[in-house]
Image (spheres, rainbow, N blue to C red):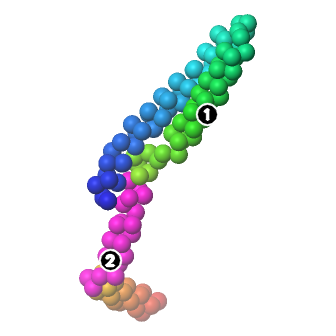
Amino acid sequence: MEQFLIYLWSISNQISAVLFFIGAASVITVIIMLITQLPCAVEDSEMDQIKRIILTSGIIGVTAFTLCSLIPSKQDLALIFLYPKIKQGTINAVQSDTTKKMVEVLNGYLDKQLKELNNDK
C-alpha cells in the first residue's frame, strides 16, 4: 500500500496537468463548434449531432476541471501521508523515559532558581 501511495504522490502533478489539458481541449472544442457551426444553415440531423458534441464536450470539460481542482498537490499529499507518523513519533518522544527524566531535572532546576529568588527578596 505504501508503494502505491508513493506512486500517487509522484504523479499527482502530472494527473492534474492532463486533466487541465483535457478540460481546456473540451472548452476549445465547444467554442469552435459554437463559432463555426451554429450560424451556418445546417440540416436538423447535423444540428442534433453538433448539439450532442457540444453537450458532451461541455460535460467532459466541467468534469475534468472539477477533478483537476480536487487533486491535492505534492505538498498536501506529503502532509496527508506523513502526519500520522509524525504525530505518533511526537507522542512517543513525549512519553519516553528520557523525556520524563529531562522534565524532572528541569523542574528541579527551576524550583531551585525560584527558591533562590524568594530568598533574595
Work out whether residue 120 can be spotted: no
Provide residue 76's location: percent of width, then percent of height.
44, 51
Q: Residue furthest left?
A: 98
Identify the residue under disc 1: 59
Of circles 2 and 1, the one toward us is: 1
The CA span between labels 2 and 1 is 50 Å
Provide residue 47's location: percent of width, then percent of height.
69, 17
Q: Residue visible at 28% across and 55% down?
A: 3
Identify the residue under disc 2: 92
Q: Provide the secondary structure element on which disc 2 rests.
A: helix
**Displayed quadrant of residue 33:** top right
The one nearer the camera, 49 or 106, is 49
> Of the residues shown, which amino acid type is indicated by label 1?
Ile
Q: Residue visible at 42% across and 39% down?
A: 15
Q: Which residues are magenta?
A: 78-98
Q: Residue visible at 36% across and 72% down?
A: 88
- Say above or below: 83 vs 42: below
**Displayed quadrant of residue 45:** top right
Provide residue 13's location: percent of width, then percent of height.
40, 39
Q: Residue visible at 61% across and 15% down?
A: 32
Reading the chain from its start, which is encountered first: label 2 or label 1? 1
